[in-house]
Every structure is written in C-alpha cells, then in structure tokens.
C-alpha cells in the first residue's frame, strides 16, 4: 500500500485528487498509477483504471487473474466494474468513500446478483494515511488565499 500512497502523493502534486493504485502479482508490482483525470482531460483516468490498463498491457491479457489491486480510496462504480471485468483476485483499499464508493458504500456492486466476478475485499488498509491525503488536499482547495 505504500507504493499506492506514493502514487496518491504524486497525483496531489500534479493537482489531481490524491488517489493511487498498484496492481501486484505474486508480490511483484505489475503496474502503478495515480489519478490523471485533469491532466488527460479524461473522466475515466482514475488511478485504478490506469493501473488496470497498464497491467493488462504488461501481461498481454484483458484479464488479471491472480492479480491484486491496492488502492488508497474505495473504488467508484466505474472502477469497481473494471475491477470485476478484469477478474482482479483481491482488492485492498484505504479510505472508504461514503459519497462515491461502490464496494462497501453506495451501490455495493460486488453484492449484486448481476456481478459476474467479485474480488475478495480488504478495506481499511492504511486508512488514516489515505484519508489524511484526501482531507488535506481538499482543505487546501477550500482555504481562501
């Protein structure tokens, strides 16, 4: 999760919402990314999506069977869907997202009968650090100059 936190810090330094994601397989990092929605003018350029794309390219497959995803924030519905379609084995995430999350909050996508693949989910990993990055980032946006 430390590598995901590094990616989140790098995203914040670029002016992006500080979310980082890392795909691993057998303990080795396959891909790592941070949010780039503003930089790329792409609403789908969430850290999870970028990391999944990179991992698929690295492995030459649209499925990431046997891979795990570590992300600093609970995935949104789009990312939770991509995680399912990629067949990610385990999802580890830091802070819950009561407004936009879709794993343990909101839609709870993996509990729906229409969900074809649900990863094992491990919430709360480095939760305080992940939440602090987000809180501090948004605080600086709301602080008058």
Image: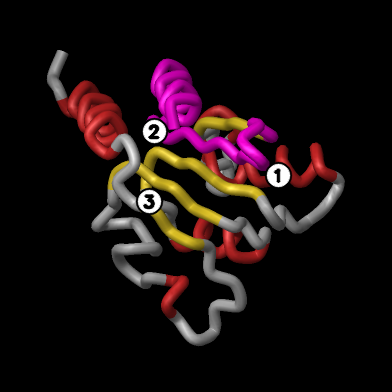
* Residue 53, quarter of the rendered image: top right
Q: Nearer the viewer, residue 61 or 107?
A: 61
Residue sitting at x 41%, y 27%: 5
Disc number for residue 17: 2
Q: Earlier in the sequence, mark 1 or mark 2?
A: 2
Mark 2 burial class by Cα count in 10 Å: few <14, some 14-19, many 20+: many
What residue is disc 3 on? 74
Mark 3 burial class by Cα count in 10 Å: few <14, some 14-19, many 20+: many
Secondary structure of the residue carrying tag 1 is helix
Residue 48: x and y in percent read 55, 45
Residue at the farthest top position: 145
Mark 1 burial class by Cα count in 10 Å: few <14, some 14-19, many 20+: some
Pair 1/2: label in front: 1
Residue 138 visible to an observer of this rendering: no
Residue 40 visible to an observer of this rendering: yes
Secondary structure of the residue carrying tag 2 is loop
Q: Please state if 128 lies on the left or on the right of 81 as rendered.
A: left
Residue 66: x and y in percent read 68, 53
What residue is disc 1 on? 53
Residue sitting at x 42%, y 77%: 111
User: Magenta segment range?
Assistant: 1-30
Q: Quadrant of the C terminus?
A: top left
Q: Earlier in the sequence, mark 3 or mark 1?
A: 1
Marks 1,2: beta carbons within 8 A: no
Residue 1: x and y in percent read 44, 32
């Amino acid at each position: 999760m430390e590598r995901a936190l590094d990616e989140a810090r790098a995203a914040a330094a670029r002016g992006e919402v500080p979310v980082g994601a890392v795909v691993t397989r057998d303990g080795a990092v396959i891909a790592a990314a941070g949010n780039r929605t503003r930089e790329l003018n792409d609403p789908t350029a969430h850290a999870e999506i970028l990391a999944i794309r990179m991992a698929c390219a690295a492995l030459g497959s649209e499925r990431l069977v046997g891979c795990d995803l570590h992300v600093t924030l609970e995935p949104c519905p789009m990312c939770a869907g991509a995680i399912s379609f990629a067949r990610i084995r385990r999802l580890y995430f830091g802070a819950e997202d009561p407004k936009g999350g879709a794993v343990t909050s909101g839609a709870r996508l993996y509990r729906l009968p229409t969900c074809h693949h649900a990863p094992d989910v491990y919430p709360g990993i480095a939760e305080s650090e992940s939440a602090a990055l987000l809180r501090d980032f948004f605080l600086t946006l709301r602080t008058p100059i």
